[in-house]
Image (tube, rainbow, N blue to C red):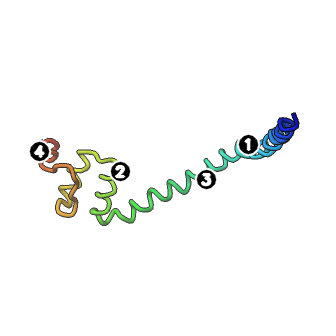
Amino acid sequence: MSSPAPPARVLLPAPPSTKSLPAPPFRVSFPVPPISQSLPPPPLSASLPAPPTKMSSPDPPVAVIVSTWFKPKAMIVSLLSMNETEFTPEVPIQSLTPVEVD
């Protein structure tokens, strides 16, 4: 009888302690989302246009990035026309070029 008593007492204080601890963090989490959302937009928008603008001059890096992210057939063909030697995707170029060009 004494064995079940100790565990029961330990479990009782545990729930209230854990509940009081998560309570504050949860309340803080709600107001945090709006703040964090307003911060990401500026850094993301600034980061995205920054690299493309600087890499606008060198087509090879842009071609690799675009093909890696979107991998569109039309884009690949257009990029291949600009730098066919430097750009070598795993997809068969011959099968894509005639279809897109035609």
User: Is 24 placed left or right of 34 in the picture?
Assistant: right
C-alpha span from label 1 to label 4: 57 Å
C-alpha span from label 1 to label 2: 36 Å
Q: Which mark is residue 26?
A: 1
The residue indicated by pointer 4 is 98
**Foreground label between 1 and 2:** 1
The residue indicated by pointer 2 is 69
User: Is 79 placed left or right of 20 in the picture?
Assistant: left
C-alpha span from label 3 to label 1: 20 Å
Determine whether label 3 and label 1 are within 8 Å by CB. no
Q: Can you say which quadrant of the picture contains the C terminus?
A: top left
How many neighbours does mark 4 have within 10 angstroms: few (below 14), some (14-19), or many (20 or more)?
few
**Foreground label between 1 and 4:** 1
How many neighbours does mark 1 have within 10 angstroms: few (below 14), some (14-19), or many (20 or more)?
few
How many neighbours does mark 3 have within 10 angstroms: few (below 14), some (14-19), or many (20 or more)?
few
Residue placed at 35% from the left, 64% from the top?
Answer: 55
Name the element at disc 2: helix
Which of the 4 image quarters holds residue 16?
A: top right
